[in-house]
Amino acid sequence: MSRAKRKITRFEKDGQKMLRWDFDGHVRSWDLSTGELRETFQHSPPRNIVAMQLSPDAKAFVTSDEVPGEYAGGPPRAASLWNVTTRQSRPLPDKVSAYGNFSPDSKTFATTVDEDDGFSTAVKLFDTGTAEEKLSIPITEPFTRIGGMQFTPDGRLILGGSQTFPARNNWRSFESSLKLWDVASGREVASFASEKTMVGFMRPAFSPDGRTVAATNWRGEKPKLYLFDVPGRKRLTTIMLGEKAIVREPVFSPDGKWIAVATQVIPEELQSNRELDAEDVPQPRIHLVDVALGAVRETLIAPQGFSASVCFSPDGSTLATGGNGKVLLWDLTKPAVAH
């Protein structure tokens, strides 16, 4: 868990208005059996911890930091790779994003190099233990953003979402795709394009065996779920998820036979309201998709509220949905009751 305090002091230097940024940010860990605080991780001098991600083996984590100091504007961002045992951090190179992902064996961290305008120039892999660069994959298409980096379960491929714009300041259109790279060579082995321009993919999910990728669209008239065949390098099917709605990230069941994905209609006139009440919006839908059939087999209608995430239990018999401080548990062993 990350925590931060910030102090901003305004002053003038050589006739220029400046800001002094001071932080007291750190990361804490607790003993789950006793609830006692075990460790505190902090830079020297302290930084603002914007985000963090823990490796699968819990021996390392990466943080996105704001660096203290005197600046004419906001503080610069940096990324740090931490060793949990030694409590020491190693800086990642300038412009390397902290919003990447660890490999399943926790030995590698994959992320992007992003310029100040947000466009990506490379995908890079770093050794988790030493923070040294292991591989650099150049992004040759201009005005391209890469995000949502993920490894296949066997760690041999990495996948990222790509958006390419026609020009630096032209945001009116873009082409979107999912790209797969070979971890050993850096070679691009597949690219799954979206159906049309101005339709991007939400963060994708791999099936447990790594043979299928599921992704939803984050922009479009109707929510859709796309299934891609990784070995065959092709799209399997497109599944409609109802009328125009916000669609969440898909999640596979532990056996890979099902996908759960939540959707929720937010009326257009309420989408700019950051303090929505659950009574103001339609009830969420949780769609259960049969992967083999490529079709929705059941749609669960949740009580009035918000559903922002879904998760299967390890045995696949229970589904948890959560959002805005409430978690619902669904028994998947019993058939749905007809209404």
Image (spheres, rainbow, N blue to C red):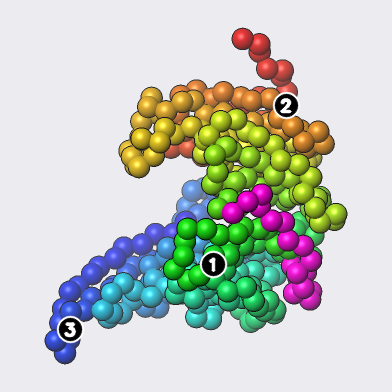
- Residue 115 relative to residue 45: left or right: right
Residue for point 69% across, 44% down: 226
Q: Is residue 294 above or below residue 122?
A: above
Examine the rendering and report whether any part of residue 28 can be seen: no
Residue for point 60% across, 46% down: 217
Q: CA distance from mark 2 to mark 1?
A: 40 Å
- The amino acid type found where label 2 is placed reads Arg
Q: Which quadrant of the figure has residue 331?
A: top right
Return the residue at label 1. Answer: 166
Examine the rendering and report whether any part of residue 172 can be seen: yes
Q: Mark 3 touching mark 1, by CB under 8 A? A: no
Residue 86: percent from left, percent from top: 56, 74
Of callouts 3 and 2, which one flags the residue occurring earlier in the amino acid sequence?
Answer: 3
Q: Nearer the viewer, residue 203 or 119?
A: 119
- The amino acid type found where label 1 is placed reads Pro
Return the residue at label 2. Answer: 297
Q: Which quadrant of the figure has residue 225?
A: top right
Give the number of marks: 3
Frontmost of labels 2 and 1 is 1
Q: Which secondary structure lies at badge 1? A: loop
* Image quarter in which the C terminus is found: top right
Return the residue at label 3. Answer: 16
Q: Which residues are magenta?
A: 181-197
Q: Mark 2 touching mark 1, by CB under 8 A? A: no
Q: CA distance from mark 3 to mark 1?
A: 37 Å
Residue 115 is marked as none
Of callouts 3 and 1, which one flags the residue occurring earlier in the amino acid sequence?
Answer: 3
Q: Which secondary structure lies at badge 3? A: strand
Residue for point 69% across, 37% down: 239
